Image: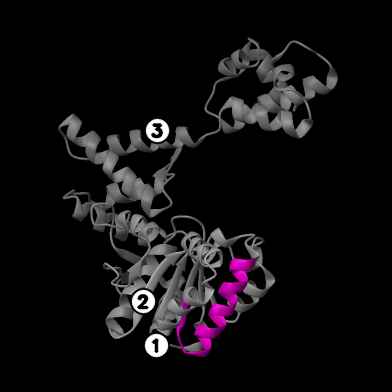
Amino acid sequence: MVNGLFTISLKDATGEKSAAVRSKEADLAPDHGPQLYVGDEQSQTVLTAFDAVLDRQPFCNPLVITGAGSVGKTLLAHGIADCWKRRYPAENVLITTGADFLRGYTNAVRSHNTYRFRRQFMKLGLLVIDDLQMLNHRASAQSQLAQLIDSMVRRGQFVVCTLPSTLAQAHGLEETLVSRLFGGLQLPLSAPSEESMLFLLDELASQRGIELDTTLGKLLIRGEAGCPSPIKTVPQLRRALIRLQMNAELSGSPITRVLIREYLKGEYLNQLPTCRDITSIVAKRLNVRMGDLKGKSRRQYLSRARGIAMMLCRTFTAESYTAIGKYFGGRDHSTVMNACEKT
């Protein structure tokens, strides 16, 4: 562990993989990003769970890795598979997805060969199922998986799954499967910390031959007053660095504070809702038509709804009073200001 950070290396997992998983791994190739999971002192449970699975500790079987998109669920699951294969080279490892499991089970049912389908899993030391939510509302396939997990756990075989939500929030999963998954360990992942992102930024920059000092790195990750950074995940960080490198090459200069500020400002503005987005939401919530909000009617309920929409547009977009007034039927800026003050 260095400076409170730990890393888990992900190399090319040597287990069998479905086509869907192989396509996912393309996003993890060296040209796309560091093959590392980076955690800090607040995520020590990740390292503990990782080691526990590799030590075959029963309390973490099955292991369910949960979290929002792009927080490293697939990366960590593949890292477990890779380390398992190296520690237990005589055992088979299968990496698949919820969609592929469902497809395989459906084909087995149609061909009246579910026994052969189940038998392939009995030869494994480790089974990794990514995107388990793809089995949502598929009761029969979920029942089959629950039985499979029971059999594998009894035999000392390990199962690792990933989900975008916690088991308590996995509304599309049957109680039988959820109960079986609760018998192991849930491992929630969160977005990388600032320290982790800075470490990963150094790795990405090194891979691409970019020199980026710590001050510029912190500006990219943190942003500054009036221009917060929208970069919260590794894919966003990778995309930002690639864009900055391209802009720097086009301008014939290294990456500078000016280039980073321009990039952050552009990304920040792109994330803001538009007047149309806000008007649509207000219209739906207040049960009025968008055309009426932009129209000339002065009926009290419409004026009130229009004022709310104008105030929200001023608050959550970068549009001026004049631009907002133009959007709402060509009204002048003083009308918008008055509506915002009254709301």
What residue lies at 35% left-to-right and 55% top-to-bottom? 23
On the image, the x and y values in percent for residue 127 come to 43, 75
What residue lies at 46% left-to-right and 89% top-to-bottom? 156
Magenta-highlighted residues: 140-159
- Determine the main secondary structure of the stretch shown in magenta: helix
Residues marked 2 and 3 touching at CB (< 8 Å): no
Residue 266, disc: 3
Left of 179 or right of it: where is 227? left
Screen quadrant of the N terminus:
bottom left
* Crowding near the residue tagged with mark 2, few <14, some 14–19, many ≥20 C-alpha atoms within 10 Å: many
Q: How is the image coloured?
A: one colour
Front residue (pair 256, 145): 145
Sequence order check, earlier mark of 2 and 1: 1
Residue receiving disc 1: 55
When asked about the image quadrant of residue 34, the answer is bottom left
The secondary structure type at the circle numbered 2 is: strand
When asked about the image quadrant of residue 268, the answer is top left
Residue receiving disc 2: 93
The secondary structure type at the circle numbered 3 is: helix
Sequence order check, earlier mark of 1 and 3: 1
Question: Can see residue 220?
Answer: yes
Inter-mark Cα distance, 2 to 1:
16 Å
Sequence order check, earlier mark of 2 and 3: 2
Which label lies toward us, 2 or 3?
2
Relative height, residue 245 to residue 175 (above, below): above
Residue 287, disc: none
